[in-house]
Image: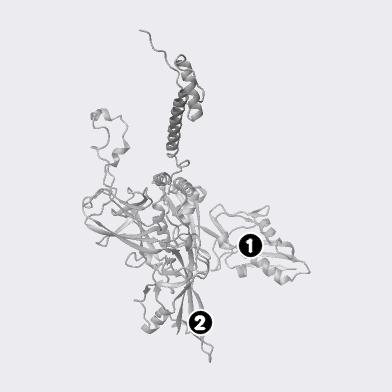
């Protein structure tokens, strides 16, 4: 019996024209006696074109489905959102505008018990709880809420208190009331709540919040008062919790009054993750535990690891299947026989970008007046005088993220991995710690041997040495207290690699003084030009512009001064070291030996240059 001849079939053609041409050539080659009319009017061409059309459509959908599997090429929003969440990034449905609010009250006068001077009567000034609601004057539907408590008894560089005379006695000219003003961050959006009932426990149960203006989860509590925490993934069993810095929490740290809160890492079985569903709603998904027998430790078991089909001796050289480790109840508790109350922020959008001085209407405010010792009438008068205003326009409000924004943010989020690995990671993460846990002004990570010469301070010679400095009340560099350091260790512990050790150390401050002389054109006022030059030097040496191991390039500073109108030349510029005396740091530094080619190089130890008293340590002369 003769064998059938093998037919040559091409699989690379994907579009209509190439598929049609391949079918024509295939017919001519293998069916030359059956069909020969390939004109556009023939019935055979109709069938070939129909087959080509089907092939073209199938190729199109094959290509489309294939590209929808890659986030950089996907076009359908639901697919982009799903892949972004697979990378750990949760897209935003609404983005709120942010601004700073001026909060002010009028306070009566009292005599200072120590000095006898007149001052505001802080015994009748209540603090204001966070979540104060303020609405826009031009658009009452736009709501803003404060994200920090307003305490008028606190006056720090990162939370300053402005006091000015409000009214005076016409006869004596002495103040009879003061206007107190503080600033507090505010974000667009109002607080909404939804409740959800749970009966029997169901593994990985979820609830849905249908709100197109959803911003973020504020708090979730059950009917027993237990708080449920949001985590990036259910296997994460530790969460950050803050506690008011008081002697009840930690007697030693409570002595540091400048640190408002203590930060702790706590393990909790009550946790959930937030996701965006395919229909664009917010979904809260819980764990797999039943709440009665929760195993919070990932303990490998011999009954689940390996291949149970093989004999034990045959498994000794076999690779382990990592998926077998998933047989654990460490993914948290599932709510049952309870009611969850979900408190979330809703609002934002483009309309929340309100103009300056538009947030002046107070819709809701809660005072903390239980600890005050003044008269009730004075307390009520202070409360009734409360006013707010935004000195700057609110910006940053927008609708849901576009597809391209989701792609870019997801790839950036995945690259960051929410971990500290490089030096820059440590810098960014350290400076990102909220100021309520202690303010960190400058940070320098190092693993150099030179930076580990202080043997008495080394906890782990193979760890990362994190040199840090903070600000004092005058915004001068100072060492951090133990409370801030402990909060920083707790904060970094959630992000550092398991094998990394971090040693928190004090950085070195080198105080300097500056003297310079300028030549001024005869047609300019010398004093005015000199004041501009002094202002420029103070700006260049402001502590915000300084950093660890940052050299001083004298030529660049001189060039900045020369750009001031009226200056002919900078005839001299000298930097000196100021130390000791109870005012400056005790660090002695040889500026002359450290200067090469007009550049003052920092020391090998992590140090930072500082002009501590700009008014007296920067001296200029004009000729």
Q: Which residue lies furthest to the right in this view?
A: 522
Measured as percent of width and height from the top left, residue 388 is found at: 47, 73
**Quarter of the N terminus within the rendering:** top left
Front residue of this view, candidates 15 and 397: 15
**For the point 46% across and 65% down, which residue is it?**
185
Looking at the image, residue 543 sits to the left or right of residue 361; the answer is right
Q: Label 1 near label 2: C-beta < 8 Å?
A: no
**Seen in the image, is 327 located left or right of residue 19?**
left
Give the image location of residue 20, x and y in percent: 48, 26
Q: Which sits in the foreground, 200 or 445?
A: 200
101 and 556: which is toward the camera: 101
Of the residues tagged 2 and 1, which is closer to the observer?
2
At x 47% / y 15%, what residue is drawn? 32
- Checking the image for residue 166, the label placed there is 2
Residue holding disc 1: 576
Q: How crowded is mark 1: few (under 14 residues within 10 Å), some or many (20 or more)?
A: some
As drawn, the residue found furthest toward the bottom would be 171
Give the crowd class for mark 2: few <14, some 14-19, many >=20 residues within 10 Å: some
Where's the C terminus, which quadrant? bottom right
Where is residue 392? Give x, y as percent: 53, 67
The x, y position of residue 462, in whole percent, is 44, 46
Residue 601 occupies which quadrant of the picture? bottom right
In this orientation, does residue 446 appear?
Answer: no
Can residue 106 be seen in the rendering of this structure?
yes
Numbered disc 1: secondary structure: strand
Could you give the CA–CA distance between mark 2 and mark 1, rounded to whole angstroms? 44 Å
């Amino acid at each position: 019996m003769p064998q059938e001849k093998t037919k040559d079939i091409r699989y690379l053609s994907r579009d209509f024209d190439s598929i049609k041409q391949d079918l024509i050539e295939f017919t001519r080659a293998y069916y030359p006696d059956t069909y020969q009319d390939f004109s556009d009017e023939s019935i055979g061409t109709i069938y070939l074109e129909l087959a080509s059309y089907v092939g073209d459509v199938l190729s199109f959908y094959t290509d489309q489905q294939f590209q929808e599997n890659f986030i950089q090429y996907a076009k359908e929003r639901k697919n982009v959102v799903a892949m972004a969440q697979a990378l750990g990034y949760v897209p935003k449905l609404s983005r709120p505008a942010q601004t700073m609010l001026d909060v002010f009250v009028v306070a009566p006068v009292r005599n200072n018990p120590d000095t006898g001077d007149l001052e505001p009567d802080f015994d009748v000034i209540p603090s204001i709880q966070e979540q104060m609601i303020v609405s826009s004057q031009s658009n009452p539907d736009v709501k803003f809420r404060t994200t920090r408590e307003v305490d008028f008894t606190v006056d720090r560089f990162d939370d300053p208190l402005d006091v000015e005379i409000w009214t005076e006695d016409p006869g004596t000219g002495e103040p009879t009331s003061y206007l107190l003003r503080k600033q507090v961050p505010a974000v667009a959006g109002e607080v909404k709540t939804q409740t959800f009932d749970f009966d029997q426990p169901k593994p990985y149960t979820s609830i849905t919040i249908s709100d197109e203006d959803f911003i973020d989860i504020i708090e979730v509590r059950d009917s027993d008062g237990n708080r449920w925490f949001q985590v990036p993934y259910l296997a994460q069993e530790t969460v950050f919790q803050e506690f008011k810095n008081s002697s009840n929490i930690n007697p030693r740290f409570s002595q540091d009054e400048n640190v408002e809160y203590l930060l702790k890492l706590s393990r909790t079985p009550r946790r959930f993750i937030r996701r965006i569903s395919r229909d664009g709603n917010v979904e809260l998904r819980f764990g797999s535990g039943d709440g009665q027998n929760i195993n919070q430790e990932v303990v490998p078991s011999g009954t689940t690891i390996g291949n149970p089909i093989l004999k034990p001796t045959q498994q000794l050289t076999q690779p382990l299947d990592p998926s077998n480790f998933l047989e654990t109840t460490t993914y948290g508790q599932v709510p049952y026989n309870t009611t969850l109350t979900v408190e979330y922020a809703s609002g934002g959008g483009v309309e929340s970008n309100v103009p300056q001085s538009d947030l002046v209407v107070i819709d809701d405010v809660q005072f903390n007046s239980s600890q005050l010792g003044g008269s009730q009438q004075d307390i009520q008068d202070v409360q009734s005088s409360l006013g707010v205003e935004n000195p700057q326009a609110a910006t940053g409000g927008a609708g849901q993220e576009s597809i391209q924004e989701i792609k870019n943010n997801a790839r950036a989020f995945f690259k960051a991995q929410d971990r500290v690995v490089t030096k820059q990671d440590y810098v960014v993460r350290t400076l990102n710690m909220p100021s309520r846990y202690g303010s960190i002004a400058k940070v320098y990570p190092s693993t150099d041997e030179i930076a580990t010469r202080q043997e008495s301070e080394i906890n782990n010679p193979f760890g990362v040495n994190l040199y840090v400095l903070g600000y004092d009340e005058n915004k001068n560099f100072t060492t951090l207290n133990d409370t801030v350091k402990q909060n920083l260790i707790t904060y970094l512990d959630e992000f550092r690699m398991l094998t990394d050790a971090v040693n928190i150390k004090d950085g070195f401050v080198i105080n300097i003084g500056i003297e310079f002389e300028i030549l001024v054109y005869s047609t300019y006022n010398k004093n005015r030009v000199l004041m501009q030059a002094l202002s420029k030097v103070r700006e260049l040496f402001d502590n915000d512009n300084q950093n660890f191991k940052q050299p001083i390039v004298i030529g660049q500073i001189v060039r900045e001064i020369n750009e001031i109108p009226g200056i002919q030349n900078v005839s001299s510029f000298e930097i000196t070291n100021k130390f000791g005396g109870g005012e400056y740091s005790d660090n002695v530094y040889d500026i002359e030996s450290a200067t090469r080619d007009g550049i003052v190089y920092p020391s090998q130890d992590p140090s930072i240059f500082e002009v501590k008293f700009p008014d007296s340590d920067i001296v200029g002369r004009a000729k």
